[in-house]
Image (spheres, helix red, strand yellow):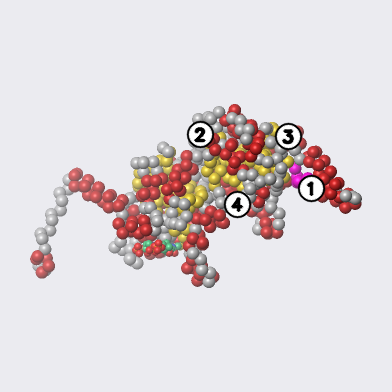
């Protein structure tokens, strides 16, 4: 007998194996797993972040969360991992409801190995993605992770590959939402990039392929985490973040609102609410929001607010490519996607970023049976070498392609200007809009009056005694003959010229008319959208 054993108290006998003791042990273990490490939780709070479980509590209906794989642990050895095998493996996965509707979720837990992704962690995410796809319900991922778990080597990378493949298989089948609530670095950033919506929270969220240290080592440039890949960088400059929030609570509240507007999958229609009498809802002040003069700015969002139920909408990419506005909202209880040119920014022209933003939004709505309402007030594509050399032809083609391909009900409302190629691209009748409505103030034409006269009457103008008087006279003639909605309406390109006050009613009637629209596309593997 060893000296220290001699003095130790007698060893406690193992507890008898009864239902009571087993249940107590089970409860104790679950309590320990859900409580996590106190030090790590304290550190998480110091970083200004909630724990993964607190986040799920904010996101899901109370008491609705069913967790799976709580007991899962990694099977790796070496590099400090061998004796350290916490349950959950750094990600909480399962299913719950939002507003009573089923969703599948995973929330990375930074308090366990920095939320890093190893084989078991990835397998849990794969499982929940597979379940979401099988059950036809939205997938929501809350990201807070140091990326690939370094100690697990290539198995971590393999885990990411499995996530990306599932993201793509689920694309257009179930809505996918990524919420970035901490670091999301390296290749890990590609899962949010493949999702339909990416939310970011200021000060805590950061996304980049290579962090500030690598940037400095390779380029010599010093940059902070926030300036390299913070929420505002991605919300304003890159378009990677769809929606940006100041805090986790408002962010997760907004995710709940978004989910309330989306169908569970591509075979369902979005959840509708009771009709609101919109078909007889006249809004006389719409005519006051939009100035008649084509060059006067106004906020297209004010028009949207008059069009949709209760003036309520969720705007995607609010701070990126602001010359086009994309929102989800309801009209007469039915969910719609609204795309509108924004005369407040760059006079509402289409450019590279606006084309990309609107194209992706149109494709999302089309994939999930959300009718499209397009509010047109567009002077054209943005001219200049910058845009041409940045590939406006290729990027503008994305928007054209997206509209041409869309089979959901499509309503175009021409609010004021509609010039040239941009008019055609903004869901004109000729590319497949189901209903085109125009206000009497419209200027629908190949180009504005001055430009047209300069091209058509160059010789006459240079020979005239007073070219300005002649130019004004000819421009007046051109406007009278060609720049009004009746020219297009007489030729069937506009289905009706409506009073501005009737816009909400006319759109609601149009949506009702098109509710059962069916449109089959020819069979093919997939199209070849210009990317
Ligand atoms: C293993 C990791 C980890 C990782 C963090 N941890 N990242 N463990 N693999 N990738 C651990 C830390 O060792 C630490 O453990 C705990 O998590 C908290 O991390 P800290 O560094 O203390 O936190 P903080 O100071 O807030 O910094 C967070 C961080 C930093 C910025 C994320 O940890 C970091 O730079 N991590 C490495 C990021 C990275 O390069 N990842 C690989 C990206 S490439 P202890 O035990 O001390 O608490 C990638 C490829 C994907 O992901 C490819 C897909 C195809």
Q: For the magenta stretch, what is the residue range?
A: 445-451
| Image spot of residue 194 (x, y percent) | 51, 52
- From the viewer's perspective, is residue 529 above or below residue 375? below
Q: CA distance from mark 4 to mark 2?
A: 29 Å
User: Please, what secondary structure does the residue beneath circle 2 have?
Assistant: loop
Residue behind mark 1:
450
Q: CA distance from mark 4 to mark 1?
A: 28 Å
Badges 4 and 1: C-beta atoms under 8 Å apart?
no
- The 10 Å Cα crowd at callout 1, few under 14, some 14 to 19, many 20 or more, is some
In this rendering, would 205 be left or right of 419? left
Label for residue 272?
A: 2
Task: Say how many tags the image has.
Answer: 4
| Image spot of residue 459 (x, y percent) | 88, 51
Residue behind mark 4:
321
Q: Nearer the viewer, mark 3 or mark 1?
A: 1
First of labels 4, 1 by sequence position = 4
- From the viewer's perspective, is residue 32 above or below residue 215? above
Label for residue 489?
A: 3
Between 140 and 127, the one lying in front of the other is 140
First of labels 4, 3 by sequence position = 4
In this rendering, would 1 be left or right of 344? left
- The 10 Å Cα crowd at callout 3, few under 14, some 14 to 19, many 20 or more, is some
Quarter residue 182 falls in: bottom left
């Amino acid at each position: 007998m060893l000296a220290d054993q001699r003095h130790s108290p007698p060893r406690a006998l193992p507890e008898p194996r009864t239902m009571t003791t087993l249940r107590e042990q089970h409860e104790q273990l679950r309590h320990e797993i859900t409580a996590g490490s106190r030090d790590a939780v304290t550190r998480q709070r110091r970083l200004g972040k909630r724990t993964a479980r607190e986040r799920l509590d904010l996101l899901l209906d109370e008491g609705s969360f069913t967790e799976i794989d709580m007991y899962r642990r990694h099977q790796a050895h070496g590099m400090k991992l061998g004796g350290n095998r916490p349950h959950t493996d750094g990600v909480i996965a399962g299913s719950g409801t939002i507003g009573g509707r089923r969703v599948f979720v995973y929330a990375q837990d930074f308090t366990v190995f920095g939320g890093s992704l190893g084989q078991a962690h990835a397998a849990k995410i794969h499982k929940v993605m597979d379940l979401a796809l099988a059950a036809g319900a939205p997938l929501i991922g809350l990201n807070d992770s140091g990326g690939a778990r370094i100690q697990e080597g290539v198995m971590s990378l393999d885990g990411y590959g499995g996530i990306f493949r599932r993201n793509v298989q689920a694309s257009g089948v179930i809505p996918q939402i990524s919420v970035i609530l901490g670091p999301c670095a390296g290749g890990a950033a590609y899962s949010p990039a493949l999702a339909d919506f990416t939310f970011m929270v200021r000060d805590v969220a950061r996304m980049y392929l290579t962090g500030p240290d690598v940037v400095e080592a390779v380029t010599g440039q010093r940059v902070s985490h926030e300036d390299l890949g913070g929420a505002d960088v991605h919300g304003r400059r890159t378009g990677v973040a769809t929606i940006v929030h100041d805090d986790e609570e408002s962010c997760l509240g907004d995710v709940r609102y978004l989910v309330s507007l989306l169908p569970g999958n591509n075979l369902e229609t979005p959840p509708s609410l009771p009709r609101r009498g919109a078909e007889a809802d006249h809004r006389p002040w719409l005519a006051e929001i939009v100035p008649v003069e084509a060059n006067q700015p106004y906020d297209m969002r004010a028009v949207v607010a008059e069009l949709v139920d209760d003036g309520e909408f969720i705007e995607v990419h609010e701070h990126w490519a602001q010359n086009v506005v994309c929102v989800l909202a309801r009209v007469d209880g039915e969910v719609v996607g609204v795309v509108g040119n924004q005369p407040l920014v760059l006079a509402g022209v289409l450019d590279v970023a606006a084309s990309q933003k609107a194209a992706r939004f149109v494709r999302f709505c089309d994939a999930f049976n959300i009718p499209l309402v397009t509010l047109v007030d567009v002077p054209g594509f943005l001219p200049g070498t910058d845009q041409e050399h940045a590939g406006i032809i290729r990027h503008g083609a994305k928007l054209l392609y997206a509209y041409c391909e869309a089979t959901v009900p499509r309503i175009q409302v021409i609010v004021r200007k509609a010039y040239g190629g941009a008019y055609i691209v903004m869901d004109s009748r000729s590319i497949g809009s189901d209903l085109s409505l125009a206000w009497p103030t419209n200027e629908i034409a190949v180009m504005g009056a001055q430009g047209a006269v300069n091209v058509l009457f160059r010789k006459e103008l240079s020979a005239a005694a007073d070219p300005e008087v002649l130019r004004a006279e000819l421009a007046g003639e051109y406007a009278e003959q060609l720049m009004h909605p009746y020219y297009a309406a007489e030729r069937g390109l506009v289905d009706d010229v409506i009073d501005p006050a009737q816009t909400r009613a006319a759109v609601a009637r149009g949506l009702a008319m098109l509710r059962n629209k069916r449109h089959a596309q020819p069979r093919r593997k997939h199209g070849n959208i210009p990317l």
